[in-house]
Amino acid sequence: MHIQQCRIRGKEGLWELEISDGRFQKIRPQQAPAELATAVPADQIFARSDQDCINAQGRLLLPPFVEPHIHLDCVLTAGQPHYNMSGTLFEGISTWDEYKTQVPLEVAAIKDRARQALRLMAEYGVQFVRSHVDVTEASFKGVQALLELREELRGTMEIQLVAFPQNGILSTRGGKELMIRAMEMGVDCVGGIPHYEFSRDYGVDSLKFIFDLAEKYDAMVDVHCDEMDDEQSRYLEVLATEAWERGWGPRTVAAHTCAMGSYNDSYYNKLLRVLQASGIHFNACPTESIHLQGRTEPYPKRRGITRIKELSSAGLNVALGQDSIADPWYPIGTGNPLRVLDMGLHVGHLLGYQDISHALDFISVNGARNLCLGDQYGIMEGRPADFILLDAKDDYEALRFLSPVLLSVHNGKILAQKQPARAAVYDI
């Protein structure tokens, strides 16, 4: 495959790429335009998947989008057995509990729903996904289904799985054994939910157990942490301290951290010391958090978004995730990272010029760091040929118009492609 006349994000001018054996072989400034005669324009490849030479016509090429936080076992279950009428996090959890006990869970059905969601994400340029899977569901069919799907799609879409104790580790009878069982089955990351444990002591002890498991299985850590409006929910300091003590920070993600939006500045500035020392990463889910949080408060009303701007400015890595697609916690959702980014930029006060110039990092390179992709990610010679082509010439245009992904290539093969929309407007 040969891509010509593209703009590579972060580089000046036009570039061309040569791809073979699933890797970038050559990346160089664009040669003479006369060489473009045989290239098919990117907006004419919709019906073909075997193009050898594509003319990007100045469009923006960048590494693929990364979905760092979603629950594939729960997708497309909204309304079953009923909708979350209060819109709260905790009704979402109780509704999922009802679903687990009232709807017969089948591996094939879970895989089918997850595959539908992954197809949506593939359409929008996602190639790397980290999914939590509920291990407090006694049949373990969700774990089995997603493990099977992970292997079936390996090389097409890369999936990491987190052992997620939806009802708590110590607050679920046999919860520790369930977590161990999931890790023995080959799940990639150890998860947790300390703020949902029965007591402060349980929450702290659960975090210590999580890191014990991570050390035993040489696994990454990805914890739902302080996903509530309570300014006294302060498990993040425990998580970061454990990561610092054990040297696990670069392999640790704190997800949501909604309570941080309620912390006073004095405490936040004290907390920042251990966050920076530990080197942990963060996931925020702005579409879901802006929907779920602040539900029990009068006005003025908190909206439960973590300090995306402040954490980023302090040099900490923050990625943005979808979290849900039509499930008990979030009734809509398309799998489009640009939609999530759009919400995050607005609620995070991140529409300054410098913010916009780095905004696509939140759904690409920052997520790659959270997934510890290392040198398997990025537009560089010798690396896997994974990239997307946006119908935009730069970051600003992509964000302003939420530009579609015209081409998504993984391991040198076309994963998804889209015809640009064309509209006719009259008499204006």
Image (cartoon, rainbow, N blue to C red):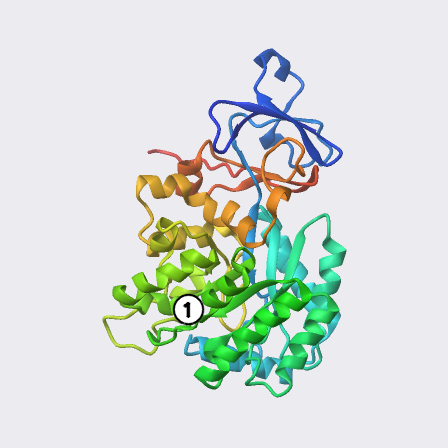
Residue 275: x and y, percent? 41, 60
Q: Is residue 371 visible?
A: yes
Of the pair 426 and 205, the residue shown nearer to us: 205
Residue 283: x and y, percent? 47, 59
Residue 81: x and y, percent? 57, 80
Residue that carries the numbered disc 1 in the rendered image = 237
Residue 211: x and y, percent? 57, 69
SS at circle 1: helix
| Residue 8, above or below 341 | above
Q: What is the quadrant of residue 418 in the picture?
A: top right
Q: Is residue 73 visible?
A: no
Q: Residue at x 64, y 59 (%)?
A: 160
| Residue 343, above or below 400 | below
Residue furthest to the bottom in view is: 173
| Three-letter amino acid code at the position of disc 1 | Glu
Q: Residue at x 46, y 31 (%)?
A: 393
Of the pair 267 and 396, the residue shown nearer to us: 267
Classify the position of the C terminus by image quarter. Answer: top left
Residue furthest to the left in view is: 300
Q: What is the quadrant of residue 57 in the picture?
A: top right
User: Is 325 on the left or on the right of 189, as rendered?
Assistant: left
User: Is 332 on the left or on the right of 219, as rendered?
Assistant: left
Q: Residue at x 27, y 67 (%)?
A: 264
